[in-house]
Image (spheres, rainbow, N blue to C red):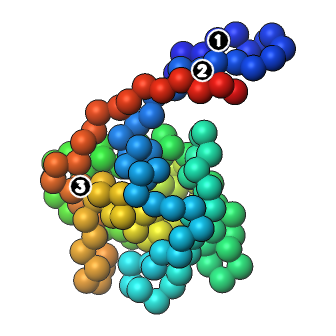
Amino acid sequence: MPMLDTRTAGPKTALMTVGPVERAIRSSVTAGEPLKTPTGRGEFRVAQFGPDALVLLLGAKGAWTPLSWRALEDVPDLRRGGGWIRVGSTFSVEAEPGTLDEHLKRYLQRATAGWVAVVLERAGVVEIDRARPARVRLRSGFDQAPEPRSTVA
């Protein structure tokens, strides 16, 4: 991500690339809106869209859970073959190999896969098969082209 010299005082202009997943999430999910877990029994919210992370509020206490845009942008690469992968969310630092949970735990050691799957589904990135065990696959026609943008930091 090219950026001007950050050692000088004053505002900086940064040229950032907004990835297709971030673009899809920002255009289809509203901060504060209640979302249901894949089972439909639980609820969570998106707290904010930061420059480096999407922040979710998870569980009854609304645990502040930042997920890097990089972690989310890499999800389509898991599914380029078009097949299904298990969500596999476990409340442990260990993850089941080959699952969305395993991928996300490379970035954050917390069970987030079920919630992330819902956000990605709302954004049109993946489809969820809610039959147990829950699975996801890349939605056909998902636009994966990044879009550059300028920001002032």
Q: Nearer the viewer, mark 1 or mark 3?
A: 1
Are circles 2 and 1 on residues that touch, CB within 8 Å? yes
Indicate the position of residue 82 as horizontal and vertical percent values: 15, 53
Residue drawn at 23 percent across, 48 percent down: 142
Q: Residues within 10 Å of mark 1 (few under 14, many from 20)?
A: few
Circle 1: element type: loop
Q: Decide if residue 94 is in sight here.
A: no
Circle 3: element type: strand
Residue drawn at 40 percent across, 57 percent down: 28
Circle 2: element type: strand
Tag 1 residue = 4
Using the image, determine if residue 4 lies above or below residue 101. above
Tag 3 residue = 138
Tag 2 residue = 14
Q: Residues within 10 Å of mark 3 (few under 14, many from 20)?
A: many
- Tell which of 61 and 51 is nearer to you: 51
